[in-house]
Structure formats: C-alpha cells, structure tokens
Image (spheres, grey):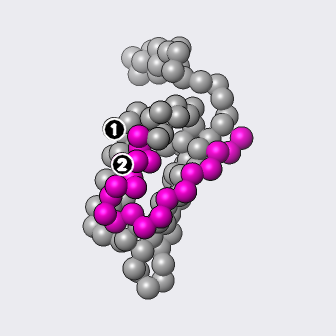
Amino acid sequence: DKARKIIQKELKKKHMSTSNRLAKIRVEYLDTPGIFSRQAGIFSKHGLDLEIVSGSGRSDKSSCATEYYIRNIDSAKVQRAIRELRDMRETLDLNIDYVV
C-alpha cells in the first residue's frame, strides 16, 4: 500500500510526461569489466529513465554495442549524458536517434 502511494505521487509530478517519444542512444565500446554498469550509472546520474536496453558483442570479443532507449526525454539531461559517455576512454562510437 505504501509503495502504491509513492508510485502514484511520482506519477503526478510535472516531470513525468505522457509522451511516447523515445531517444535511442547506441554506444559501441571496448569490452572491459564493469563498462556496462558505468554506462548505466551515467544515465542514472543524469536522472534518465531507461525504458529498453539491448546489447550485443562482436564474435572476436573485442567490442560491444548497447542500445539504450530513454522515454520522457529531457534534452539537456540527454546531452550531458552523451557528453560523458563520449568522454569515456572505452567509447568507440555513439549515435542518437529520436523515435516517435
């Protein structure tokens, strides 16, 4: 019951949008221990909600790619996260698309 009240309160906040718009961020990076959790930490630090996460690795295990889908986009937060992801030494490539 307490959890339901907390969720209902959060849903009423202004920052919660009913928009179905998604940002898809695709990051290709060198496969190193802990890299995925560090990337997810960046999204969390900037208050971005990950809707869907999909990843794959190359057969030679040299690099991986992960697609992050973010709902209720705050473009300033997304840009800060992108900047931080690009600055990671393991990041090889990063692309962003907006999906309606």
User: Along the line of sight, which residue is nearer the eye, 81 or 33?
Assistant: 81
Which residue does the image show at 49% across and 59% down from the upper left?
Answer: 94
User: What is the crowding at mark 2: few (fewer than 14 residues within 10 Å), some, or many (at least 20)?
Assistant: few
Which residue does the image show at 51% across and 21% down from the upper left?
Answer: 15
Q: Find the magenta span and give its range.
A: 80-100
User: Along the line of sight, which residue is nearer the eye, 90 or 36?
Assistant: 90
Do the residues bearing badges 1 and 2 touch, measured as CB atoms within 8 Å?
yes
48 up-or-down from 98: above or below: above
Quadrant housing residue 92? bottom left
The extreme bottom residue here reads 60
Q: Where is residue 81 drawn, in percent x and y?
A: 41, 44
Q: Is residue 12 magenta?
A: no
Q: Which residue is mark 2?
A: 84
SS at circle 1: helix
User: Along the line of sight, which residue is nearer the eye, 77 or 50?
Assistant: 77
Q: Where is residue 29 drawn, in percent x and y?
A: 41, 67
Q: Which residue is mark 1?
A: 45
The extreme right residue here reads 100
Separation of marks 1 and 2 at Cα, in angstroms: 11 Å
SS at circle 2: helix
100 up-or-down from 34: above or below: above
